[in-house]
Image: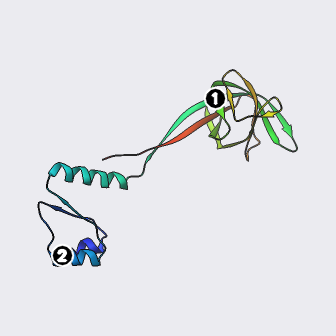
Amino acid sequence: MNLAASSASTLIGFNVRADSKAKKIIEINNQELFYFSVIYELIDHVKNQLSGLLEPDIKEEIIGIAEVKDVFRSSKLGAIAGSIVSEGVIQKDQPIRVLRDNVVIYEGELESLRRFKEDVREVKSGTECGIGVKDYNDIKTGDQIEVYKRTEVSRTV
């Protein structure tokens, strides 16, 4: 029990009960104690505890790609990529990658997304739009802007 206390471990009893002296030590050390009489319940408990310690996997799903057809420069807005959405949906609040010749040259986020002169939150496939990339002005004709969604997937043992 001293080893468990020094390493902040959880105590597990299988078909046993702690005596009063052990209970007092457990209470003083503020430790967790679990009793089990069915082995499958114990195994499930340990699996759940271990799964809770694992970092989640990050899954990335591409939700849209825009092809840069022309670049417009503005002293106020910087470089604006005149683009057409070739696949999926471009959403303003999702992370992006800028690709040149299928090589990622920048990762970041959108500063602006416009359809004609109007700010929009998303643009669908086959539609033209103006895209401003935050903190990046080296956009060139032929670049691709890839919008993706990150999802956390919890891992299990």
Q: Which residue corresponds to the image point at 30% horizontal and 47% vertical from the top-left?
A: 157
Report whether residue 127 is seen: yes
Q: How is the image coloured?
A: rainbow
From the viewer's perspective, tell me whether residue 51 is left or right of residue 115.
left
How many angstroms separate mark 2 from mark 1 (CA)? 61 Å
From the viewer's perspective, tell me whether residue 78 is left or right of residue 102.
right
> In the figure, 73 relative to 7: above or below?
above
Query: Which amino acid, by three-letter code, is at mark 1?
Result: Val
* Residue farthest toward the right in the current orientation of the protein: 75
Q: Which mark is residue 129?
A: none
Q: Which residue corresponds to the image point at 18% horizontal and 48% vertical from the top-left?
A: 40
Secondary element type, mark 2? helix
Q: Which mark is residue 22?
A: 2
Q: Which mark is residue 89?
A: 1
> In the figure, 42 relative to 106: above or below?
below
Along the viewing direction, whichever of 122 and 56 lies nearer the viewer:
122
Q: Give coordinates of residue 117: x percent, y percent.
A: 83, 32
Report whether residue 100 is seen: no
* Residue farthest toward the left in the current orientation of the protein: 15
Secondary element type, mark 1? strand
Query: Which amino acid, by three-letter code, is at mark 2?
Result: Ala
> In the figure, 19 relative to 68: above or below?
below
Q: Give coordinates of residue 36: x percent, y percent.
A: 17, 57
Indicate the quadrant where residue 11 lies.
bottom left
Q: Nearer the viewer, mark 2 or mark 1?
A: 2
Q: Which residue corresponds to the image point at 25% horizontal and 54% vertical from the top-left?
A: 46
- How many C-alpha atoms fall within 10 Å of the one at disc 2: few (<14), some, or many (≥20)? few
